[in-house]
Amino acid sequence: QARDPHQPEFMQAVGEVMSSLWPFLKENPRYAQMGLLQRLVEPERLVQFRVSWVDDAGQVQVNRAFRIQHSSAIGPFKGGMRFHPSVNLSILKFLAFEQTFKNALTTLPMGGGKGGSDFDPKGKSDGEVMRFCQALMIELFRHLGPDTDVPAGDIGVGAREVGFMAGMMKKLSNSAASVFTGKGISFGGSLIRPEATGYGTVYFAEEMLKHAKLSLDGLKVSVSGSGNVAQYAIEKCMQMGAQVVTVSDSHGCVIDPEGFTPEKLAILMDIKNNRRERVETYARELNLRFDAGKRPWHVPVDVALPCATQNELDLDDAKTLIANGVRCVAEGANMPTQMDAAEAFIHAGVLYAPGKASNAGGVAVSGLEMSQNALRLSWSRDEVDARLRHIMRDIHENCVRYGTRPEGVNYLDGANIAGFVKVADAMLHQGVY
Ligand code: NDP
């Protein structure tokens, strides 16, 4: 804490992992040697740089950008880029730290990293977004490479932004590798990558329910957010027979007691992805209730899928969800549930999955995109989806292996310990560096 006094999100993420690890380390002291924990909480390298670009009005704009190369113990640094005004060192360090364990859980050879900028793509023209992405790459390209650091998308970084960055990467590196994952299908992207995080979260929720002799079929679900992860979580829930009754953004939430249909989801996707408007527009056009400034956790449901951003579900929200009979909470976003809220779920016997387990499907399919690029071939939709499902099943099994307690499976402990063991073993074998 004394070394990083202004990094609350990073402290929160480290604290959460350490609280799972202490009892495990007592029983397995070999993991407390060689400065392992001290090394694990210190990124291998981080870069911060200025991005200067010219807007449509001819004005010079200056943004701040970062890349956190947290751990390469089990493979190249790997993790998304986030463009949002809230981006700072603390948020990116927490995300890179989490990413290291998440990537380990996928069983694919990927280290952990994260990056981003305080640039806000909202309200910018395509030309402005392109010029910003290109200006950012003028610095970032020298830190990337297929065996060094492989970025992808995150909040505010979708197919458009990845395309602009990958294009500039190609130009500056004189290599067609493009390095990014989440690329367009026409230049090396993988089928199912856009769907992967949302689908994977729902596959994981289904595994948890199955383990508890339940099923998603017929259950009522609340989803927060309305971006990439939320949209495909909604789609997969519908395919599995669940009824999704909420969607939200940073301005408020929409409540739809009848539930989503494929037609409604297509309208939401058009509003968010093409027209780039808010969910309030969606509520207005479909004549649905819009609760301004609210999050969706007051709506009674069986399953809650937080898919927006960090710390969006607090202790009061958890108490409300528990009082309303929620049975399962699976995180599509990174660290959306505050620590005391997560503890309340676990204490109440709710099946609670931390993002590093339940949202690992996105990076898993990014890993599959890297494999396809290296092999110079493309797998079919069904093949990638089957591999994604398999990986989510494996992650679930690993959580059960390390998280089974007399009172049930503690998925938080299970994910933290399983991810840690993989990274720690790799670090111990490679000596101190
Ligand atoms: P998008 O940019 O596509 O969507 C983000 C959504 O979250 C939007 O609905 C946005 O609303 C909302 N949101 C963002 N910031 C806030 C805020 N401060 N308060 C309330 N709502 C907010 O991002 P993704 O769907 O890709 O990412 C969502 C989450 O999932 C993030 O935590 C991300 O780290 C995580 N994740 C994403 C992966 C991926 O493959 N994309 C992989 C694994 C995790 P608004 O439009 O109003 O800002």
Image: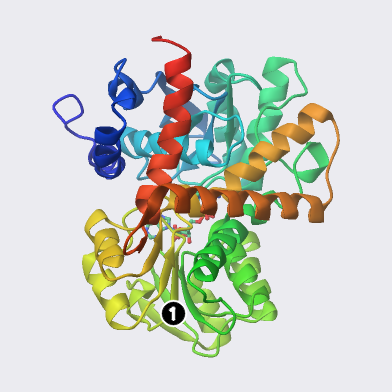
Q: Nearer the viewer, residue 213 or 386?
A: 213
Q: How many marks overall? A: 1
Q: Quadrant of residue 417?
A: top left
Residue 425 image point, x, y percent: 45, 25
Crowding at dot 1, Cα within 10 Å, few <14 / some 14-19 / many 20+, comes out as many
Residue 21 image point, x, y percent: 29, 39
Q: Residue at x 55, y 58 (%)?
A: 229
Q: Residue at x 48, y 57 (%)?
A: 332
Q: Is residue 21 left or right of residue 397?
A: left
Asked if one can make out residue 229 in the rendered structure from this viewpoint, the answer is yes
Q: Nearer the viewer, residue 64 or 366?
A: 366
Residue 58 image point, x, y percent: 52, 35
Q: Residue at x 34, y 26 (%)?
A: 31
Q: How is the image coloured?
A: rainbow
Q: Quadrant of residue 161?
A: top right
Residue 125 image point, x, y percent: 59, 48
Q: Quadrant of residue 84?
A: top left
Considering the image in quadrants, where does the N terminus appear?
top left
In the image, is residue 429 above or below residue 396? Answer: above
The amino acid beneath tag 1 is Asp
Judge: label 1 CB < 8 Å from ligand 1: no
Considering the image in quadrants, where does the C terminus appear?
top left
Asked if one can make out residue 69 in the rendered structure from this viewpoint, the answer is no
Q: Residue at x 36, y 52 (%)?
A: 412
Q: Which residue is mark 1?
A: 302
In the image, is residue 417 above or below residue 44? Answer: below
Q: Element under label 1?
A: loop
